[in-house]
Image (spheres, rainbow, N blue to C red):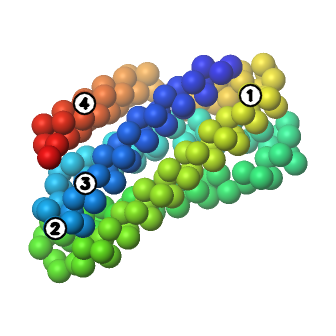
C-alpha cells in the first residue's frame, strides 16, 4: 500500500521546501534584516498542523506494524514517536522566540538563529531518517494485511468533513506562504 508512503513522501517534499524558506528568512534576519514574523509563524503553523493533522499519525501507525513484522530492524528507528514529540516541542520553542522578537523583547539574533537552526536541522534529519529507514523498511516488511490495518486505523480516526476543511486550509496556507515569499524575495 505504497499510496500512504507516497502521500507521506509528498508531504516531506513540501515540508523540506518550507524548511528551506525558513532557513532563508533566518539567514536574512541574522544578517541584520527585519524578521518577517508572519512568514515564519505561517511556516511553523503549516508544519505543525500538517504533522498533527494526520502525517505523524500515519507514520506512527506504520512504525507500529513494522515493529510487529520486523522488530530487529525496527529497533534502529525506535525513537520515531519520541522524535515526533521533540519536533513539536522545538516548534513551540521557536514560535515563542518569534513572538518575543515580534514584541520587541531584546533577543540576540544569534540566539534566535540557533533556536531556528536547531528546529530546522532536527526536522530535516527526521525527514531524512524516515525516507532512508522507515519508508523502505515498511515497503519491505509490511504485508497487504498490515497495510489494510494501517488504513483501517487511520480511517477509524477519520472525520471526512473535518479532514477536507483542514486540508483546504492547509493548502491555502501553503499557497499564501509561497506567494508571500515569492513577492518578498530580495
Q: Which mark is residue 35?
A: none
Disc 3 and disc 4: Cα gap in Å? 17 Å
Position of residue 31 in the picture relative to residue 152 (left or right): left
4 vs 2, front mark: 2
With 97 as the anchor, is 77 left or right in this view? right
| SS at badge 1 | helix
Q: Position of residue 13 (x, y in %)?
A: 46, 34
- Residue beneath label 4, please? 175
Q: What element carries label 4?
A: helix
Mark positioned earlier in the residue sequence (3 or 4): 3
Q: Whole-Å distance between the Cαs marked 4 and 2?
A: 27 Å
Binning the other alpha carbons within 10 Å of mark 3 as few (below 14), some (14 to 19) or many (20 upward) gives many
In the rendered image, which quarter contains the N terminus?
top right
> Which badge, 4 or 2, is on the more N-terminal residue?
2
Under tag 2, what secondary structure?
loop
Do tag 3 and tag 4 residues touch (Cβ < 8 Å)? no
Closer to us: 117 or 93: 117
Identify the residue under disc 2: 32
* Residue to which mark 3 is pinned: 25
Q: Are marks 4 and 1 in contact (CB under 8 Å)?
A: no
Q: How crowded is mark 2: few (under 14 residues within 10 Å), some or many (20 or more)?
A: few
Viewer-side residue, 186 vs 43:
186
Q: Distance between the residues labelled 4 and 1?
A: 31 Å
Residue 140 at what x, y percent from top left?
80, 29
Residue 28 falls left or right of residue 126: left
- Residue where numbered disc 1 is placed: 139
Amino acid at each position: 500500500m505504497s499510496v500512504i508512503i507516497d502521500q507521506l513522501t509528498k508531504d516531506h517534499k513540501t515540508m523540506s521546501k518550507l524548511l528551506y524558506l525558513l532557513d532563508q528568512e533566518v539567514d536574512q534576519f541574522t544578517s541584520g534584516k527585519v524578521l518577517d514574523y508572519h512568514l515564519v509563524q505561517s511556516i511553523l503553523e503549516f508544519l505543525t498542523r500538517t504533522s498533527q493533522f494526520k502525517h505523524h499519525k500515519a507514520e506512527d501507525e506504520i512504525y507500529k506494524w513494522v515493529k510487529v513484522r520486523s522488530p530487529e530492524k525496527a529497533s534502529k528507528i525506535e525513537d520515531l514517536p519520541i522524535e515526533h514529540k521533540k519536533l513539536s516541542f522545538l516548534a513551540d520553542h521557536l514560535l515563542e522566540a518569534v513572538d518575543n522578537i515580534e514584541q520587541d523583547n531584546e533577543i540576540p539574533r544569534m540566539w534566535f538563529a540557533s533556536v531556528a537552526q536547531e528546529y530546522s536541522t532536527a526536522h530535516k534529519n527526521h525527514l531524512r531518517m524516515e525516507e532512508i529507514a522507515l519508508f523502505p523498511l515498511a515497503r519491505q516488511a509490511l504485508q497487504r494485511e498490515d497495510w489494510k490495518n494501517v488504513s483501517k486505523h487511520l480511517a477509524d480516526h477519520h472525520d471526512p468533513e473535518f479532514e477536507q476543511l483542514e486540508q483546504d486550509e492547509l493548502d491555502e496556507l501553503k499557497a499564501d506562504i509561497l506567494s508571500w515569499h515569492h513577492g518578498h524575495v530580495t
